[in-house]
Amino acid sequence: MSNPSLLILAGDGIGPEVMDQVKRIITWYGDKRDIKFDVSEDLVGGAAYDKHGVPLTDETMAKAQEVDAVLLGAVGGPAYDNLDFSVKPERGLLRLRKEMDLFANLRPAQCFDALADFSSLKKDIVAGLDIMIVRELTSGVYFGEPRGIHIEDNMRVGINTQRYTEAEIERGARAAFDMAMKRNKKLCSMEKANVMESGILWRDVVTEVHADYPEVALTHMYADNGAMQLVRAPKQFDVIYTDNLFGDILSDCAAMLTGSLGMLPSASLGSPMANGRPKAMYEPVHGSAPDITGQSKANPIACILSFAMALRYSFDQGEEATRLENAIEKVLADGARTGDLMGPEGGKPLSTTEMGDVILAALDASL
Ligand code: IPM
Ligand code: MG
C-alpha cells in the first residue's frame, strides 16, 4: 500500500522557514516511527503569484483535492498589498478552503504552563486554559453574494452579504457537538441574534441539532459578549461554535490569551473522502509576519502543532500526536524560547532552526 500523501504549500513570509522545521519532523516520523508520507510541494499566495500571476493555479488546486492532507504555511505580505483584489495572496487560501469544502475549522487555544506568564492577562486567568473554537469556514460574509464595490447615485457603495443556509449551520454544529463530546461536553454557540436574521437562524439550528447530543450542555451567547467573556474569564468555555467572520476575530483574541500567536495550530476539515479520511488542511493561525521574515526568528511551534493535528485528525495517530505535543511542552518547560516568547527578563532567543533542534531532541528522548 502506498504511503499517505501530503501536499506542502509553505507560501509567503515566514511560511517556508517554519515549514522547514515541520519537514524535519516528518522525516523523523519516517525514520524513527516508520510513519511515512509521500510529500510533494507547491506554491500558494504571493509565491504563486510571482511565478504564475495567480495566488493558486488550477493544477495546485487539483493536487490539493487529491492528497490526504494539505499543510499550509502562511500567505501575504506588503509586496502584494496593492494587487488587484482577485489575485491577492489571501484569495489562494480562500479558494483552497472553499473548493475543498473545509467547513469545520478547529482552532484550539491552549495555554502551556511554561508560558502562562507571557499572556497579557493575569496568570491565574489563563493558566491551564484549554478551549477549542470551531469556526464555520466556507460560508457567511466571506463568500456571500452579492458582494463588490458599486456606484449608486454617484457614490461608491461597498457590499458584502452574510448568508447561511440551515445545512451550512448544521454540519458545522455537528462538528462542534462531536468535538464537545470528546472533551468536556460543553458547547457555547456565538452569533448576533439580537441584530442579524442569520444569527436567529444560527441559534435555532444549533438548538435543533442539540436534540441529537443531549449529553452536551449548550449555551448561546452574543458574539460581542463572547469577546468580552474570552478576556474576562476564558476558562468558562470548552468548545465554542461560531460563524466565519466572528470566528476569525474571536480566534485571534483566544490565541493571544495563550501568550503568543506563534503557538496556535489549526485544522480545517471537510467531508470524508473515499478512503474515509476527511478532506483536510492544516495551518498555523499566525500569518506571514513580514517584519521578521528571513531572519530565522520565527517560532515554528504553531506549524509543528498543526502537523500534530494532522497526525490526529487525518492519520489516526493520536498517540503520536500526543508524543509531539508532549515534546513541545517539555522543551518549553525546559526554557526553550523563540523571540516571541521572551519575557522582560530577556536572554538569548533560539532561532527557528534551533527550536526545531530541541524539539527533535525531545522526540528522540521520548523513545
Ligand atoms: C485566518 C486569516 C485569514 C482569514 C486570512 C489570511 C484570509 O486571518 O485564517 O484567520 O481571514 O480567514
Ligand atoms: Mg484571522
Image (cartoon, grey):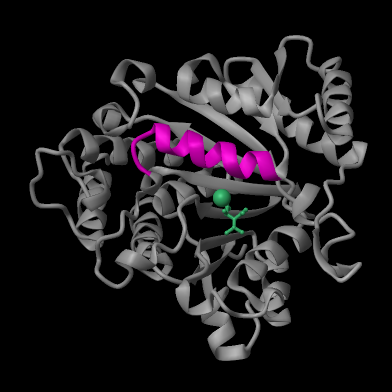
**Quadrant showing the N terminus:** bottom right
What's the residue at 33%, 35% (across, down)?
326
> Whole-percent x and y of residue 163?
87, 46
Residue 339 falls left or right of residue 230: left
* Quadrant of residue 245 within the rendered picture: top right
> Whole-percent x and y of residue 327?
29, 40
Secondary structure of the magenta portion, mostly? helix
What's the residue at 58%, 15% (across, down)?
184
Residue 156 falls left or right of residue 120: right
> Whole-percent x and y of residue 103?
74, 47
Above or below 55: residue 149: above
* Quadrant of residue 256 within the rendered picture: top left
**Quadrant showing the C terminus:** top left
Query: Which stretch did the figure color magenta?
Result: 245-260
Residue 312 falls left or right of residue 91: left
Q: Nearer the viewer, residue 40 or 331?
A: 331
Queried whether the magenta region covers residue 92, the answer comes back as no
Queried whether the magenta region covers residue 251, the answer comes back as yes
